[in-house]
Amino acid sequence: TNTPLAGRVAVVSGASSGIGAATALRLAELGAKVAVLARRKDNLDTLVESITRAGGTAIAVPVDVTDREAVHAAARQVADRLGTADLVFNNAGVQLVSPITDLRQDDWQRQIDLNVTGVMNVIGAFVPHLTAAAEAGGPADLITTSSIAATRILEKFSVYSGTKAYISHLTRLLRVELGRKNVRVATIEPGMVDTELPGHVTDPDATKLMADLIDQIDVLQSADVAETVAFMAAVPRHVNLTEITILPTAQA
Ligand code: NDP
């Protein structure tokens, strides 16, 4: 069997649906032990069950990644139950698109809390794992989900795009520090993927924009992104694919 990730310990945040769930499945299929993190425990349990049924190893670690202490507790749990994490897919995120003049400040804050603070909480809890794994001579990966929104000028996406630009640029800087320690740091920047993401948007125009795109073109599926993340982690340890943009072929 093809198990290039055998021996790896992976952590996937935002694993209860969409890209995270698909990636956890794929990493497990390729031989990694996987800890799945998100708030919806039932979804995590179902995912763990299907990984286990397929002969893989996974544990559910329900956690709200905006809670710094809870993420540290999750990291201790991963260490105790699976060992040192050497593949962190820092993926939980929320997209709440609206015109700035609507002043949906709660939505602004939610995006900043999850896409910036949540991402930093995962980094804070797992960087010690990654540097330890690299020091021990093995591969180590920190892969964060950004978006094409990090660089594109999309009307009404301002706060979301700002959080993703933060992630993309943060990654370039972290590489300078962690690359020297043999920890690979990377972002994946997807275009439109068919997930629950648009379901959280309350602005009707923005919701329609995304629904239309899904109707009109053959958009990406979560499994397409999962395959790419797995590839990024499976290349030889001295190779760092740093920023991968993945678009549906027909998306402008
Ligand atoms: P989903 O909404 O399906 O997944 C989001 C995940 O984040 C869920 O598992 C959710 O689980 C989790 N999450 C939300 N809040 C928290 C929290 N406070 N603590 C822990 N986990 C949380 O959408 P996607 O799969 O599309 O999104 C994954 C990533 O991909 C995001 O960063 C998104 O910005 C990015 N992305 C998506 C694109 C797309 O077109 N779909 C395009 C480009 C980037 P739960 O609610 O159970 O906590």
Image: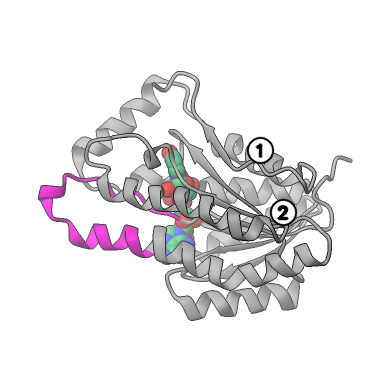
In the image, residue 117 lies in the stretch drawn in magenta: no
Residue 210, quarter of the rendered image: top left
Is the CB–ligand 1 distance for label 1 below 8 Å? no
Q: Amino acid at mark 2?
A: Ile
Q: Position of residue 34 (x, y in %)?
A: 70, 59
Label 1 CA crowd tier, 10 Å (few <14, some 14–19, many 20+): some
Mark 1–mark 2 Cα distance, whole angstroms, equals 16 Å
User: Can you say whether 7 is above or below 18 in the image?
Assistant: below
Q: Taking 196 as reference, is 97 left or right?
A: left
Q: Position of residue 114 (x, y in %)?
A: 40, 62
122 on left or right of 160: right
* Mark drawn on residue 51: 2
In-front residue for pair 40/227: 227
Residue at 32% x, 49% y is: 162
Q: Residues within 10 Å of mark 2 (few under 14, many from 20)?
A: many
> Seen from this angle, which residue lies furthest left?
101
Q: Which mark is residue 227?
A: 1
User: For the N terminus, which image quadrant?
Assistant: top right
Whether residue 156 is visible to the viewer of this picture, yes or no, is yes
Lower sequence index among marks 1 and 2: 2
List x then y, in percent, for residue 95: 34, 49
Kindly tell me whether residue 16 is visible in this rendering.
Answer: no
Q: Secondary structure at mark 1?
A: helix
Q: Nearer the viewer, residue 181 or 45?
A: 181
Is-magenta flag for residue 112?
A: yes
Residue 21 bears which disc, if any? none
User: Of residues 170 and 200, which is closer to you in this image?
Assistant: 170
Write the start and end of the magenta stretch as one range.
Answer: 93-113
Q: Residue at x 71, y 75 (%)?
A: 79
- Identified by mark 1, the residue type is Glu
Give the quadrant of the C terminus: top left
Query: Looking at the picture, does residue 212 appear above or below residue 68?
Result: above
